[in-house]
Every structure is written in structure tokens, then in C-alpha cells.
């Protein structure tokens, strides 16, 4: 599995959490999971996915916030999380280090607070969607 480049699970009754071992998939370029019962927080080990370009998690049961380790993902182009149970201040300042980020979708999460000023460092960002949250700034 260490050579895995794509993981996509859609409309399956998977339960549990995203395992910390995901960080061992050094060739992973795309992770997508939609309409599952996967919950818990995003593991900090996603920061080890140095080749990932697209990360999606829709209509699941994820909680917590985006780990600061996201700042290590310099090749990340698309980061989409929507319709999850995340709360609090979910956007870390380290998001500004994602120099390849083109699309950031964080909607229907019930997150709150100010957008980090470091988002201004995202010179490649072309799309930002944050519907149905309590963001300001």
C-alpha cells in the first residue's frame, strides 16, 4: 500500500477514523471520502503526505480542526471539507504555507473566528468557499 496514489471512498458505510498510518502513504496524491461515517479529527500525520495535491472530505462525521501540519503540504492544490461536524477555529495560520493551493472549500462546518491573515500568502488561490459558517474578518 505504500505506493498508493489515490484513495477515494464514496457512499459507503465506513465507520471509524482516518488512521494515523495515512502519513506513511508517501506517494498519495489524492484522498477523497464522501458520505461515510468516518469521524474523529484529521490526524496530524496528513502533514507527511508530501505529494498530495487534492484532499476532500464531504458529508462525514469529522470533528475538531485542521491540523497545523497542513502547512507542510507545499504541493496541495485543492483542500475541500464540507458538511462535517468541525467546530471552533478551524483554519490554522499555517495554511499560508500551502504555496500551491488553488481551491479552498470549507463550508457547512460551524466554524467560527477570523480568517488568518496568512491566507494573503496564497498567491495561487483562485477559489475560496466558506458558506454556512460563523467566520469574520
Image (spheres, rainbow, N blue to C red):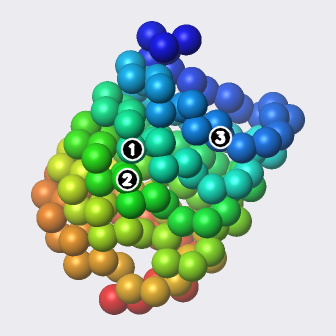
Q: Is residue 67 left or right of residue 40?
A: left
Q: Quadrant of residue 73?
A: top left
Kindly tell me whether residue 101 is visible in this rendering: no
Residue 66: give x, y in percent of width and height.
48, 60
Give the spatial CA distance, label 3 vs label 2.
15 Å
* Residue underneath mark 3: 18
Q: Residue shown at 29%/54% (left/top)? A: 71
Q: How many marks?
A: 3
Label 1 secondary element: helix
* Residue underneath mark 1: 47
Q: Is residue 105 above or below residue 33?
A: below
Q: Quadrant of the C terminus?
A: bottom left
Do the numbered discs 1 and 2 sit on residues whose CB atoms are within 8 Å?
yes
Q: Earlier in the sequence, mark 1 or mark 3?
A: 3
Label 3 secondary element: loop
- Depth order, front residue of 87/43: 43
Give the spatial CA distance, label 1 vs label 2.
5 Å
Q: Quadrant of residue 15?
A: top right
* Residue underneath mark 2: 69
Residue 98: give x, y in percent of width and height.
25, 51
- Depth order, front residue of 18/58: 18
Q: Quadrant of residue 20?
A: top right
Q: Earlier in the sequence, mark 3 or mark 2?
A: 3
Q: Is residue 54 above or below residue 118?
A: above
Label 2 secondary element: helix
Label 3: few (<14), some (14–19) or many (≥20) C-alpha neighbours in 10 Å: some
Kindly tell me whether residue 86 is visible in this rendering: yes
Amino acid at each position: 500500500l505504500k505506493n498508493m496514489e489515490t484513495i477515494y471512498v464514496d457512499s459507503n458505510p465506513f465507520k471509524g477514523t482516518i488512521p494515523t498510518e495515512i502519513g506513511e502513504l508517501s506517494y498519495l496524491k489524492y484522498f477523497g471520502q464522501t458520505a461515510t461515517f468516518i469521524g474523529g479529527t484529521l490526524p496530524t500525520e496528513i502533514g507527511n503526505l508530501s505529494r498530495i495535491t487534492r484532499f476532500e472530505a464531504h458529508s462525514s462525521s469529522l470533528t475538531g480542526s485542521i491540523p497545523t501540519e497542513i502547512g507542510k503540504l507545499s504541493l496541495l492544490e485543492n483542500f475541500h471539507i464540507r458538511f462535517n461536524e468541525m467546530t471552533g477555529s478551524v483554519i490554522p495560520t499555517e495554511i499560508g504555507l500551502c504555496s500551491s493551493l488553488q481551491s479552498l472549500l470549507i463550508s457547512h462546518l460551524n466554524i467560527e473566528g477570523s480568517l488568518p491573515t496568512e491566507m494573503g500568502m496564497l498567491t495561487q488561490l483562485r477559489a475560496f468557499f466558506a458558506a454556512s459558517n460563523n467566520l469574520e474578518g
